[in-house]
Amino acid sequence: MATLEVKDLHVEVKDDEQNKTQEILKGVNLTMKTGEIHAIMGPNGTGKSTLSQTIMGQPNYHVTQGDILLNGESILKMPVDERARKGLFLGMQYPAEIQGVTNAEFLRAAMNARRADDDQISVMAFLKELDKNLALLDMSESMTERYLNEGFSGGEKKRNEILQLLMIKPTFALLDEIDSGLDIDALKVVSKGVNSMRGDNFGSLIITHYQRLLNYIVPDVVHVMMGGRIVKTGGADLAKTLEKEGYAGLRDDLGLDVDLVDEN
Amino acid sequence: MEAVHDYTALKPELAAAANDHGEPKWVVDRRLAAIDDLADAALPEVNRFDIHRWPLTPAEPLAFSPSATDLAADVPVAADHVQIVQVGQTTVAVNLPADLADQGVILTDIFTAFREHPELTQPAFMTDIIKSNEDRLTSFHTAFLNAGVFLYVPQGVVIDAPIEIHLVQDSTQDDRPLVSHVLVIAGTDSHFAVTQHLTTQGDHANLASCVVEVRAQANSEVHFSSFDELGANTTTYLNRRANISRDATVDWAIGLMNDGDTFGDFDSELIGENSKSDAKVITLTGGRQRVGVNTRVTNRGKKSTGNILQRGVIMEKSTLIFNGIGHIIHGAAGANAEQENRVLMMSSKAHGDANPILLIDENDVLAGHAASVGQVDAKQMYYLMSRGITEPQAKRLVIRGFLSAVIQAIPAKDVRQNLTDTIERKLENGAEVE
Ligand SMILES: Nc1ncnc2c1ncn2[C@@H]1O[C@H](COP(=O)(O)OP(=O)(O)O)[C@@H](O)[C@H]1O
Ligand SMILES: [Mg+2]
């Protein structure tokens, strides 16, 4: 069993345009284990992406207090690629586009990066795994010869993030708004992909603004984040309550003093 | 400034060498006129780049001497390829399938062409497309020409396989300048691709003055790619220009991978109505190498379209200047000219510049430009590394992507692979010395 712990995490981000630093996360605590699916819900601008990017190690986010531990070991000083090789994966809200590098070539490089030099994946084994996952995600084979995310539609990018998840098989996957911009059919396909990973050796933190996704990927634990903190934790039904009452309702119930970007 | 030579003193010797070489009188006359021009001609203008001290016009007598053909041992020669292979001044192989020869296609060394096809070569060679007296380097080229290729594709002929031109510079000795001219005439409605590969054998310091002229007649389509891999001790002058007629297209895909100092002057003259050109240049510089490139598109014809895309990666203490020159002549109504020049800096000790220069003398046009000098894209690096890919490998992938425009435009798969391998090797070498 593997664990991912976030302890009293405070994170600042520097806005390059205004050249001022702003504290986004103000003491986040969270513990997950493999075998569990956690969801984080919260209004826009509350720091959900900041949390996932900080766990992954995006250099713009600065930890000012607290720690992130993977299997008891602090990862704060590790560069991004090392965190990935230790088993972390971030399905991004806005994946980068890279011209001239095919999807297939990239996938192989990513898979081989976490394997020993004398144990690189064979072309046959790679293609077999690729075909299986393409079928599962209802993706055409031609997607793999296209350049990485270049000219992909929003939905294709999301599917491609999940394809990477299935190929790389991380221990913990942080999935940031994989539902945004998806129609219901695509949402089902993406959910099927994530659900296929479920098991004792996999844990996931699913970030979403809406409850809808959680009908398809049913979480074990739901956290609500507001104003840079986790303000409430519960079971799958918490998401449903939230859907009914809205973030503003919960905020008022808890007597929090938090501005919501878009009251809903 | 390079030492001032008394070139005119070389005239009798030069005429004798050319005559002994069996050249027609018009060629010898053109050489002698070029010698006269040399004395006063200025070097070409290269914005923000200084070539005055480069040994680009050595005053060595014109000499013809064979090279060892085994210097071309690396060149894949195959009967089913359309190709010509030269080492220095020596033609090693010419493969022209019979069906193409029957259709009137000519692929031969340039001196044979001067003798046997003066009706085609005399009106074109250094007179019509590039003019011999334009500057010091063009004059020198005409005067001291010692190698080259002539390709003629007659009206209506379509060739599917790329026509390969392999030129191996013989630098196994001193005083062996390679002054090589590739003349391409594309007849009306013809359609073909040329892939040129320049390499050097030997490490003596020599000049390479390599000029390409393309005349694309009406409604023809020519895709010219060049993979330039001249050696570290070669000082290179490249001049490549196309005159493009009505409804004709000439595309350039240039992978400038020379290891030595290089000045490149690339030019598309969009003369006819609705003519088109797409000029793509990539380069990767390292060590103390200096590379300056002028890529010019001149829109003369109405509704002509010209694009320039230049991308370079600079490492260590190298210098790279990209000048993109877009000139729209008065009367070229409906012309379209876009350009993008980008330089990626891999070292703080490298020096790079990307200069768009627009000269627009017509109102009814669409013109745009983009230029940048910057670092590897942080967002792309983060994305790749978030998948476990190490920083050096991620960098190589991002750079390969940055340079992919030209790689994709090369028709032959093995050439694409070779270019990719060369880029990887240069990046690895550059990273080690950093
Ligand atoms: N890279 C960044 N630069 C500047 N501000 C940022 C950056 N990332 C996040 N922020 C700010 O931090 C706050 C939280 O953003 P984010 O974590 O994206 O929220 P969420 O994902 O919950 O919508 C917002 O006010 C946002 O503007
Ligand atoms: Mg977000």
Image: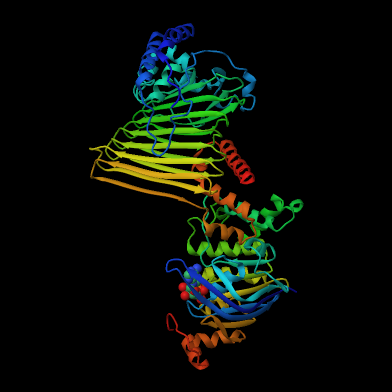
The x and y percentages for residue B267 are 38, 33
When the figure is inspected, residue A78 is found, relative to residue A232, above or below; the finding is above
The residue nearer to you, when weighing B268 against A213, is: B268
When the figure is inspected, residue B319 is found, relative to residue B101, above or below; the finding is below
Q: How is the image coloured?
A: rainbow
Q: Is B213 placed left or right of A99 in the picture? A: left
Q: Is A159 placed left or right of B106 in the picture? A: right
The x and y percentages for residue A148 are 54, 55
Q: Residue A19 sits in which quadrant? A: bottom left
When the figure is inspected, residue B302 is found, relative to residue A11, above or below; the finding is above
Q: Quadrant of the N terminus of chain B?
A: top left
Residue name at image x 35 percent, y 25 percent: B134
Residue B248 shows in this picture: no
The residue nearer to you, when weighing A88 against A122, is: A88
The x and y percentages for residue A164 are 61, 61
The residue nearer to you, when weighing A90 against B50, is: B50
User: How many marks are shown on the rendered structure?
Assistant: 0
Residue name at image x 43 percent, y 83 percent: A263
Q: Residue B433 sits in which quadrant? A: top right
When the figure is inspected, residue A229 is found, relative to residue B236, above or below; the finding is below
Judged from this view, the residue extending furthest toward the right is A118
Residue name at image x 40 percent, y 42 percent: B308
The x and y percentages for residue B315 are 55, 44
Residue A151 shows in this picture: yes
